[in-house]
Image: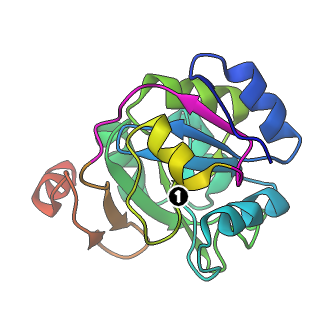
Amino acid sequence: MKTEIIPAIEIEHALRILKSGGIVAFPTDTVYGLGALAFNNAAIESIYIAKDRPIEKAIPILIGDLGDLDKVADDIPNMALRFAARFWPGPLTCIVPKKQILPLAVSATSTVAVRIPDHHDACALLRAAGPMAVTSANISGWASPSTAQEVYEQLNGRIPLILDGGKTKGGVPSTLVDCTGQGPVVLREGPISLAELMTVL
């Protein structure tokens, strides 16, 4: 497979690949992500293959607008909606009850992790494509890439397209909070602290 690199603003080519069941790497507000359309099980499985990712690891969903949350989640807790209104777009990933039509390749459990990235190019792609299953664009266990070239060095020949949006901020992954219980449970600490979350509640 030939891996192309094109400017991130040229999303039409990316959309063609995604709609035909392919996967695409693109910049986010943290690192470069590798994504497929959220409802295409075979495409999501190809993310695991490209990354050598263990199949039991769930893949988060990225959306471009808050209005897309109900496309991937059911019975959304009020807590999650309040967090989303305050911290999205941004480095907060909320675990919410999964819509049952989501493929098992996204999550084999009853929940799904969702966020809106604070990145113009990523949101432009997500608004055009709809919800996407996205994980870091690296070989599993290797360093997460912050440039298109770093993605290319790891995944050349494994994926068809990389959208080049320059260097991403890299660094700290998003805060991961479980919103399915009585109160928020932070499963991964990130830029947004539990204390900040509690101020919203």
Q: Is residue 42 left or right of residue 62?
A: right
Q: Nearer the viewer, residue 41 or 111?
A: 41
Looking at the image, can residue 99 be seen?
no
Residue 80 placement (x, y as % from top left)? 40, 55
Q: Which residues are magenta?
A: 157-170
Q: Secondary structure at mark 1?
A: loop
54 left or right of 182 in image: right
Residue 63 included in the magenta stretch of the image: no
Locate residue 176: give its quadrant: bottom left
Is residue 161 highlighted in magenta? yes
x 81%, y 55%: residue: 40
Is 85 rendered above or below residue 102? above
Q: Looking at the picture, how far across and down is residue 157, in whole percent?
A: 71, 51
Q: Residue at x 70, y 40 (%)?
A: 3
Q: Main structural element of the magenta stretch: helix, strand or loop?
A: loop
Place residue 42 in its image quadrant: bottom right
Q: Give the residue type at disc 1.
A: Ile
Where is residue 35 drawn, in percent x and y? Answer: 63, 48
Q: Which residue, as the protein is rendered here, is positioned at the far top?
A: 9
